[in-house]
Image: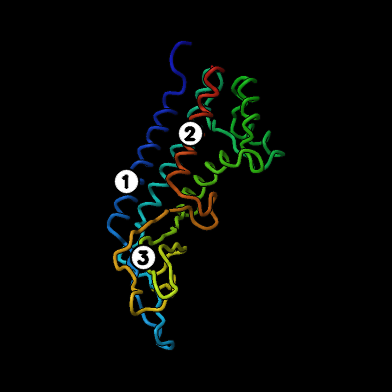
Amino acid sequence: MTDTPFPSSYLKIQRAKHHISDLNAQIAGFVKRRPYRLIAEADPKIPGKYYGVVKIREKIPDVWRIILGEAVHNLRSALDHMAVELVRRNGGDTKRVQFPFAVSVDRLEEAIAQGHIDRASPQVVEKVRSLKPYKGGNEALRAVHDLDVTDKHDSLVTVGETAGFQRLGLEGRGVTISAVKFTPVKDGMKVLSFPAGGDVEINQDPEITIDVTFGRGQPFQGQPVVPTLHQLTELAEGVIASFGPLV
């Protein structure tokens, strides 16, 4: 066949990229609004000791979790659309066909049967096996499925953040602190201590850094969301492209 295979899969990939770009732009705007402040507060018990205390002016929007879930779902759907087309091109029944994911290598054949990808050609089935879409195999590929399941059946995929302040200007009297990084981010948390007075004063307008990460208990826990989504997109594209020669 001369037509490009899997057109709907690539449309799903493009939609995922749109969501990732949207999320990236929203994160950049969030950082630009300077949602966190760092203020100096005196220790009431120790004269001359001060703390750098985080004050939250704006929380991470809940909609980010929805955008993240939509991006992941489009990647998962791209693989399912590919599976359906592979079965269709082999003359098989496309009902309930999906790309198979297994909990372990021992359950892969069961997943292949349940996903009905075995209605495609033997070469396709062998290719699926080589991708190792199970826990303990291709963990990143399996994570696309796990994140999608979480978003659809459990709860929204959670996000966290690692934040920091740079250009603190804390130098003098034996103190040299130019930056601080912390996670989780909580209002009123103390992230550093220093003696104040004389030439040691905290910069009230430091540069803010924020890494939005996958939340606790999720695949890629603590990893930055946008770069990881880009990697998963490249992975899904590569998987789809690898089946091209088989149609």
142 w.r.t. 53: above or below: above
In the rendered view, does 166 fall on the left or right side of 146? Answer: left
Question: Where is residue 151 drawn, in percent x and y?
Answer: 47, 49
Q: How is the image coloured?
A: rainbow
> Residue 12 lies in what quarter of the image?
top left
Whichever of callouts 3 and 1 sits on the residue coming sooner in the sequence is 1
Badge 3 local density, few (<14 within 10 Å), some, or many (20+)? many
Judging from the image, what secondary structure is the residue with disc 1 in? helix
Question: Nearest the camera: 8 or 41?
Answer: 41
Residue found at x 44% / y 58%: 162
Q: Are there few (<14), some (14-19), or many (20+) residues within 10 Å of tag 1? A: few
Q: Name the outermost residue toward the top.
A: 2
Residue 25 is tagged as: 1
Q: Report x, y in % for residue 76.
A: 49, 37
Tally the numbered discs.
Answer: 3
Rendered position, 21 above or below 8: below
Q: Is residue 159 above or below residue 142?
A: below
**Label 2, on which residue?**
234
Where residue 6 is drawn, which disc sits there? Answer: none
Label 2 SS: helix
Residue type at mark 2: give it.
Glu
User: Which residue corresponds to mark 3?
Assistant: 168
In which quarter of the view is residue 210 placed?
bottom left
Q: Nearer the viewer, residue 238 or 180?
A: 180
Q: Give the amino acid at mark 1.
A: Ala
Q: In the image, is 189 to the left or to the right of 111?
A: left
CA–CA distance in space, label 3 to label 2: 38 Å
> In the picture provided, is 14 more to the left or to the right than 77?
left
